[in-house]
Image (cartoon, rainbow, N blue to C red):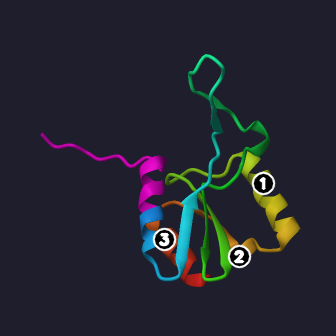
Amino acid sequence: MNRIFRQNESSMCMAVLNFLNYMPRTRAWRMETTGMPRRPADGSYRLVRNRERRGKPDIAGFKGLTGFLIELKMPGEGLTPEQELWRSDFVDRTGAGDRIAVCHGVDEVQQFWEKL
């Protein structure tokens, strides 16, 4: 039986993090974008959403002393309105538009990394 492996954004993120953390003088991590676990009095865990933080990139990191941000998207997908707003706000505040990228796979991340 032939099985077709379909990559999703989560598996792409793991591949990108493995690539980035293998590269010299580079450290990267996944940014928490969905929320934080909270433990109410009943002892159960619940995920509290970070609604005010919508639009943050998936990955943050440093190459040497240069910080960078990466938003991962599946092929053919683009930024959501919240992500567009977050990105434009980041560029307006920092002027670092060359250190934030939208990538559709490890190859595009590698090209971005080489330009840093």
What distance separates the C-alpha of mark 2 from that of mark 1? 15 Å
Secondary-structure class at tag 3: helix
Q: Position of residue 29 (x, y in %)?
A: 55, 61
Any mark on residue 50, and which? none
Q: Magenta span covers which residues?
A: 1-16
Q: Position of residue 32 (x, y in %)?
A: 62, 48
What residue sits right under mark 2 in the picture?
Answer: 98
The numbered mark, 2 or 1, whose residue comes first in the sequence reads 1
The numbered mark, 1 or 3, whose residue comes first in the sequence reads 3
Secondary-structure class at tag 2: helix
Q: Quadrant of the N terminus?
A: top left
Quarter residue 19 falls in: bottom left
Tell me: residue 114, above or below residue 49. below
Quarter residue 40 falls in: top right
Residue plotted at (43% across, 46% down):
8
Mark 2 in CB contact with mark 1 (< 8 angstroms): no
